[in-house]
Image: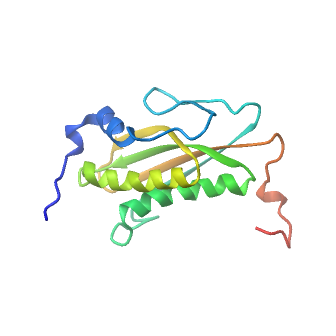
Amino acid sequence: MEQSRTEIASLGEFGLIEHLTRNFEIQNASTVLSVGDDAAVIDHFGRQTVVSSDLLLEGIHFDLMYMPLKHLGYKSVVVNLSDIYAMNATPTQILLNIGISNRFSVESLNEFYEGVYAACEKYNVDLVGGDTTTSQKGLIISVTAIGEVAPDKYVKRSTAKKGDLL
C-alpha cells in the first residue's frame, strides 16, 4: 500500500503550524494564550516560573535509522520535562522549534507530532508555541519547557548531598 506524500511547501509555514496544532487542547489554567499568535501568554498565579531548553540534532542526539519519528517527538518533550521535575517544579508548557529539510513530508511531521502530543497529554503540558524553519539537511529540534514551583521551593543541583534520593 502506497502512502501519500504531501510536500510541506504546499501548506506554507503558517498552514503547516495550523495543520500540526489544530487538535491540541489546553491542559492548564495558567495557559492564557497558546499557539497561533506572536507569543504565548502564561499566568502562574503567584508561583515562580522555571524554564529549561534543550537542542536535539540529527546525527548527534538521535539517528532516524533507529528511532521512529513518533518516539523522537515523545523523547524531545520528556528530556526537557525531566529538567523541570529535577528542580522540584511542575511542567506546564513547552515551546517546540523544528528545522526541517525537504526530505520530510507533512505525513512524517504528523508522526513526530503524535509523539509530542502523547508526551504533552501524559504529563499535562500545553504546547504554546515555537517556530518552524527550513534546514539544509537533517532535523533540528529545540524544546523549551516552562514550569512552576511554590516560591523558593525549587531545588538546585548544587545543593545535592551524598545520600540524597534522586
Instruction: Tell me where residue 37 sits by quadrant.
Output: top left
Q: Residue 158: where, in percent of width, then height?
A: 80, 58
Q: Is residue 166 above or below residue 118?
A: below
Q: Residue 166: where, in percent of width, then height?
A: 76, 67
Q: Residue, x 83% and y 63% (percent of image)?
A: 160
- Residue 64 visible somewhere in the drawing: yes
- Give the left or right position of residue 138, taking residue 81 as reference: left
Residue reaching furthest to the left: 2
Please identify the quadrant where the N terminus is shown.
bottom left
Q: Residue, x 19% and y 38% (percent of image)?
A: 10
Q: Residue, x 47% and y 45% (percent of image)?
A: 96
Q: Residue 139: where, in percent of width, then height?
A: 36, 55
- Residue 139 visible somewhere in the drawing: no
Q: Residue, x 40% and y 47% (percent of image)?
A: 98
Residue closest to the eye, 91 or 28: 28
Q: Is residue 57 above or below residue 17?
A: below
Q: How is the image coloured?
A: rainbow
Residue closest to the eye, 33 or 14: 33
- Give the left or right position of residue 132, taking residue 48 as reference: left
Residue closest to the eye, 4 or 9: 4
Q: Residue 62: where, in percent of width, then height?
A: 43, 65
Number of numbered discs = 0
Q: Is residue 7 above or below residue 162?
A: above
- Give the left or right position of residue 24, taking residue 30 as reference: left
